[in-house]
Image (cartoon, grey):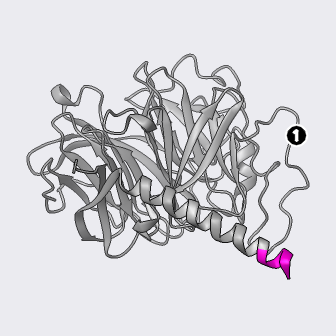
Amino acid sequence: MVRMQARRLRSLAAMAVFALGAYALAADYVIETVVEDIDHPWSINFLPDGDALVTQRGGQLRRLSADGELSPPLAGVPPVFVRSQAGLFDALPARDFAESRIVYISYAHGDQRSNTPRVARARLGPEGLEDLEVIFSGTPTQRTAAHYGGKLAFLPDGTLLVTTGDGFNYREDAQRLDNTRGKTIRIHTDGSAPADNPFIDDPEALDVIWTYGHRNPQGLVVLPDGRVFQHEHGPAGGDEFNRLEPGLNYGWPVITFGRDYTGGRISPFTEYPGMEQPLVDWTPSIAPSGLAYYDGDAFPQWQGQFFVGALAEQSIRRVELTDDGAVDHGRVFDEIGDRIRDVRTGPDGSLYVLTDAVAGRILRIRPSDPD
């Protein structure tokens, strides 16, 4: 009885400390709803003037003004295959957008029998996209409506990274270099392969492949110093946070900490020669989606850290690099209470969050006002 009471007292004390810590954290920020009732928003990317481009999985591209006004759907979006996980994904402004007005979009193209991830570029005009040109199409096509990846990011040299998923039913293709499934693709902005891509001289590999062995990467960040970080969905467990380097194999499905959704084993290996280990593994799965690197001034205590959105866990995780990898500091902003689709650092230093729902929201996390 004494031992049980001692355990109960320790538990109550821990709860009190947690509550005080949560209150102290909560006192440091405010969560504001910028937009509500937006159907399945998928990504948000900021323009030089403080406006943002917001995509919806259903095929809509919207412009969000700096003062929180959401435009009607913009014209010029190409036909998008919308079903299950398929739809419109990212919309990334060119690095010289202020002059060129060029935007890069990723989306699912085709139909249930034959579809693939695509990337197109277009000029953003007063009413929408103009002069659209497809610069990348995944090969081969698939018969599933799942695992597209879909994230875009620029490297410091101006080349474009594109994440692709394994198509769900084609996971072995992630290890093969004759297709674009389960890869990070690196291309010039016209779609051509850079001459220094890692497999450019391999006659049995596609020139555009930069990394491989991925399942469904829906988080991608390039740091100012050029380092690239990505996260990807595992199956039942085995979600990963990785640092990407050209030519490396990230293991799926040969190595994984996850299991099949049936409970069966996918592979007996969690490590294997020539395959990279994740910096962070999430088992059970949190279903990571959206990744922000915080380099703003509004929250100096978070400088240099990552925020990972989670769909299944309905959470945001704070991850910090260490000398020998990375550490997950756990959940933050639990009061949001929704599936998180995207997390980005805004030009004002606030964090912007998209919730994944029919009546989704765009949230802004900013410092609390001084008393």
Q: Between residue 24 and residue 277, name the one nearer to us.
A: 24
Asked whether residue 107 appears in the rendered view, the answer is: no
Name above or below for residue 291 compared with residue 55: above
Examine the image and state in which quarter residue 200 appears: top right
Q: Decide which of 171, 280 is in the foreground and name it.
A: 280
Could you say where residue 299 lies in the image, as x and y percent from the top left?
Answer: 36, 39
Q: Main secondary structure of the magenta part?
A: helix
In this orientation, does residue 33 appear? yes
In percent of width and height, residue 367 lies at: 29, 47
| Direction bottom: furthest residue | 1
Residue of label 1: 272
Whether residue 322 sits left or right of residue 257 in the image: it is left
Q: Residues within 10 Å of mark 1 (few under 14, many from 20)?
A: few
Q: Is residue 346 above or below residue 340?
A: above
Q: Residue at x 41, y 51 (%)?
A: 343
In the rendered image, residue 4 lying in the magenta stretch gets the answer: yes
Give left or right: position of 288 versus 29. Answer: right
Q: Quadrant of residue 204?
A: top right
Residue 93, above or below 255: above
How many callouts does the rendering have?
Answer: 1
In the rendered image, the vertical position of residue 323 relative to residue 352, given as above or below? above
Read off the magenta span. Answer: 1-5
Q: Amino acid at mark 1?
A: Tyr
Residue pictured at 68% horizontal, 27% vertical = 247
Q: Position of residue 19 (x, y in %)?
A: 51, 64
Residue sitting at the far front: 2
- Queried whether the magenta region covers residue 361, the answer comes back as no
- Counting from the top left corner in percent of width and height, residue 189 is at 38, 29
Q: Nearer the viewer, residue 207 or 29?
A: 29
Q: Which quadrant is home to the N terminus?
A: bottom right
